[in-house]
């Protein structure tokens, strides 16, 4: 399991998806603290919006934050109140 930080770039619009994904918003996340820009799709049930900084959980442990068995490997687990500052 990894905890990452990222910024919500946009929503993923999907007219057809697995029934188990119903109720989850899918977000495009720009990962922070990467050497190059890197984007991932994460499921969200807490209501993060475009431009917000979020905490992400990845890997098999994500299933503990889901309401049902769903093929998701990245989940928004928190919304960060202010832009994170990390010194080099």
Image: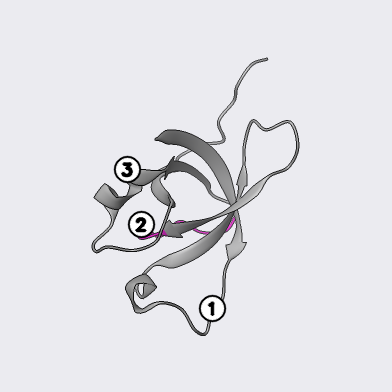
Colour pattern of the rendering: one colour
On screen, residue 66 versus residue 53, left or right, reads left
The vertical placement of 84 against 8, above or below, is above
Look at 24% across and 61% down and name the residue there. 67
Element assignment for label 1: loop
Q: Which residues are magenta?
A: 44-50
Look at 75% across and 37% down and name the residue there. 36
| Label 3 sits on residue | 61
Disc 2 packing (10 Å; few <14; some 14–19; many ≥20): few
Instruction: Specify the farthest residue to the top.
Output: 88
| Label 1 sits on residue | 14
Structural distance between the alpha carbons of marks 1 and 2: 19 Å
Closer to the camera in the image, 63 or 27 = 63
Look at 54% across and 78% down and name the residue there. 14
Q: Main secondary structure of the magenta part?
A: loop
Query: In the picture, residue 48 is in which quadrant?
Result: bottom left
Classify the position of the C terminus by image quarter: top right
Closer to the camera in the image, 81 or 66 = 66
Structural distance between the alpha carbons of marks 1 and 3: 25 Å
On screen, residue 43 versus residue 27, left or right, reads left
Structural distance between the alpha carbons of marks 3 and 2: 17 Å
**Residue 63: percent from left, percent from top:** 29, 51
User: Going from the N terminus, do you reach mark 1 or mark 3 first?
Assistant: 1
User: Going from the N terminus, do you reach mark 1 or mark 2 first?
Assistant: 1
């Amino acid at each position: 399991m990894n905890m990452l930080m990222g910024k919500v770039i946009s929503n993923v619009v999907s007219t057809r998806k697995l029934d188990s994904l119903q109720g989850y918003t899918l977000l495009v996340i720009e990962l922070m603290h990467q050497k190059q820009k890197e984007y991932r799709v994460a499921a969200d049930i807490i209501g993060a919006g475009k431009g917000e900084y979020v905490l992400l959980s990845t890997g098999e442990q994500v299933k503990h934050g889901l309401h049902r068995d769903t093929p998701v490997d990245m989940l928004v687990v928190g919304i960060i109140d202010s832009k994170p500052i990390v010194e080099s």
